[in-house]
């Protein structure tokens, strides 16, 4: 599914009207009729039921007026709460207001909080609410009677359907700057919107459905929208092919540089996840102090390193690790290695000089953040997997700034440094060096526990080892990682209490589910 920014949606609407000659009234009519169809499919027939339609001043409000009319046609009893003065309604929205005024539809003018209180005297009789106050492009906090309307809607016990995006939600960033409608169903129009899927947006949108309103596919194609939602029908095609006559060497060899005193589990989780993702061979670069600990997983091999006298990686290990990378397809580096100066020297040299793809995570990211000038134009593909705090350190800004603009920050960083960025979190963002963006819909808050990032690093590296190019490997790994978490949450009946090790063991079943899913 393509995901469009508010600016891209405005351009698409204009293109449909001006180049292809499709009147705005037709697009609005298609939107309203389609939303009523989806309302019925999700919540049942509206015949004889009161439906509250909250209408704002713009085209979103115009869509709401069309919805009220089509509900009326189906025997419902719509009540239009018009939150803008009729004079504020312009263009196609004004036309639809005149049509509704000519019908026996209850219209209640609400221009202040006192009007709202009196207009909603019979609110207990309402079956369903339609939120058509504000659509894409809203960047200010709702106030006054609009804020009061949101509070009223959010206190409603029945179904709430949002038109395009819930009012109060930024459709690009997924952020709210004030009150926001919490919908059970959001019917978004023409093309998906990223803000419905990232950060807090997913918590307000409820179930998301995309309604085709008649924008020509040629216009969508010409818009060159580079942001997509990862979907099973597409992602399943990325799964590595398993040759019947293949052997362990066929499916790649990964070297892991991870772990330090007290954090050896990070290395084990990373290597174990790569094996669970189908990697043929995994080797851990092993300091003498950790040789016995790394033997905990017998399937993982070790590459013994010289004793530097300390239980951490040092610049003196560079030649050994570079030698160990011979005949390896990929290097995973960073989980649990610490940020000592000598470890930092090693990470930077490997980043700048290694000719194999690298998945860079955790402490390796913090090391690179201290010397951002070394990040640009590496000699081979680099996949960086920061959480928001690590991303903030990489760009020298606050975590709040990162979360407020995840898409733009990840994309700009990836393009500027010619790397792939996996910005973790709710609605993980995968950003490519060519401007490509993908959002991941899988995963849940039960995954907010230690070691999950180490597992993701291993899955990405494991897929690259099996021959996938870095971009599809990153997209597939993020999807599978989240799907494994969703499976565990479903099995437990709660989004908490499962561990990173358990998630790693769920990877084969997640791959099987994806591979066997209906591509439709």
Image (spheres, grey):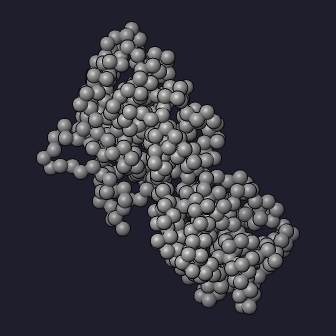
Residue 105 percent location from the top left of the image:
72, 86
User: Residue at 60% across / 42% down in the picture?
Assistant: 402
The structure residue drawn at horizontal position 55% and vertical position 37%, both measured from the top left corner, is 391
* 515, above or below 258, in the image: below
Could you tell me if residue 455 is visible in this image?
no
Above or below, 5 against 46 in this view is above
- On screen, residue 394 above or below 238: above
Tell whether 320 sits left or right of 140: left
Closer to us: 18 or 70: 18
Q: 498 and 427: which one is in front?
A: 427
| Horizontal relation, residue 213 to residue 150: left or right | left
Going by the picture, which residue comes out furthest to the top? 309
Q: Residue at x 65, y 58 (%)?
A: 169
Say left or right for 500 vs 390. Answer: left
Q: Is residue 316 above or below residue 427?
A: above
Q: Position of residue 151 (x, y in %)?
A: 74, 62
Question: Which is nearer the eye, 119 or 478?
Answer: 478
Q: Position of residue 341 (x, y in %)?
A: 49, 17
Q: Residue furthest left?
A: 245
Q: Residue furthest front?
A: 19
Left/right of residue 294 with respect to residue 441 in the rendered view: left
Looking at the rendering, which quadrant does residue 204 occupy? bottom right
Let me know if residue 169 appears in the view.
yes
Quadrant in the picture for residue 379: top left
């Amino acid at each position: 599914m393509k995901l469009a920014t508010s600016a891209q949606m405005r351009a698409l609407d204009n293109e449909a009207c001006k180049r292809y000659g499709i009147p705005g009234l037709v697009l609005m009519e298609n939107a309203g009729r389609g939303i009523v169809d989806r309302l019925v499919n999700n919540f049942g027939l509206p015949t004889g039921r009161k439906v509250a339609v909250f209408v704002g001043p713009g085209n979103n409000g115009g869509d709401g007026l069309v919805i009220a009319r089509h509900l009326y046609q189906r025997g419902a009893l719509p009540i239009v709460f018009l939150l803008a003065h009729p004079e504020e309604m312009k263009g196609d929205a004004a036309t639809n207001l005149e049509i509704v005024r000519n019908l026996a539809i209850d219209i209640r003018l609400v221009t202040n909080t006192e009007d709202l209180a009196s207009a909603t005297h019979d609110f207990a009789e309402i079956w369903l609410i339609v939120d058509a106050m504000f659509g894409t492009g809203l960047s200010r906090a709702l106030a006054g009677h609009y804020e009061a309307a949101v509070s009223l809607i959010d206190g409603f016990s029945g179904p709430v359907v949002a038109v395009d995006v819930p009012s109060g939600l930024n459709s690009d960033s997924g952020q709210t700057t004030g009150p926001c409608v919490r919908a059970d169903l959001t019917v978004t129009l023409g093309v998906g919107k990223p803000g419905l899927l990232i950060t807090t947006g997913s918590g307000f949108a409820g179930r998301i459905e995309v309604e085709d309103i008649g924008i020509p596919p040629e216009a969508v194609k010409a818009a060159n929208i580079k942001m997509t939602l990862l979907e099973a029908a597409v992602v399943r095609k990325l799964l590595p092919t398993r040759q019947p006559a293949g052997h362990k060497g066929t499916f790649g060899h990964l070297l892991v540089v991870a772990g330090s005193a007290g954090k050896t589990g990070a290395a084990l989780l990373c290597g174990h996840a790569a094996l669970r993702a189908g990697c043929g061979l995994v080797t851990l670069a092993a300091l003498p102090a950790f040789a016995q600990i790394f033997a905990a997983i017998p399937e993982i091999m070790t590459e013994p390193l010289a004793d530097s006298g300390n239980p951490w990686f040092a610049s003196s290990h560079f030649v050994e690790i570079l030698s160990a990378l011979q005949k390896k397809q990929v290097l995973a580096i960073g989980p649990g290695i610490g940020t000592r100066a000598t470890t930092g020297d090693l990470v930077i040299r490997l980043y700048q000089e290694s000719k194999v793809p690298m998945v860079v995570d955790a402490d390796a990211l913090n090391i690179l953040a201290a010397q951002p000038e070394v990040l640009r134009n590496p000699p081979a593909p680099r996949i960086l997997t920061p959480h928001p705090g690590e991303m903030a350190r990489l760009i020298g800004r606050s975590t709040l700034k990162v979360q407020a603009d995840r898409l733009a920050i990840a994309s700009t960083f990836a393009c500027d440094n010619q790397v792939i960025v996996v910005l973790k979190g709710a609605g993980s963002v995968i950003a490519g060096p060519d401007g490509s963006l993908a959002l991941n819909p899988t995963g849940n808050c039960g995954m907010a526990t230690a070691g999950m990032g180490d597992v993701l690093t291993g899955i990405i590296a494991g897929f690259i080892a099996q021959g996938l190019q870095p971009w599809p490997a990153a997209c597939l790994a993020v999807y599978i990682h989240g799907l494994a978490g969703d499976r565990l949450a479903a099995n437990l009946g709660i989004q908490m209490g499962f561990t990173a090790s358990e998630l790693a063991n769920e990877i084969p079943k997640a791959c099987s589910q994806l591979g066997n899913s209906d591509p439709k």
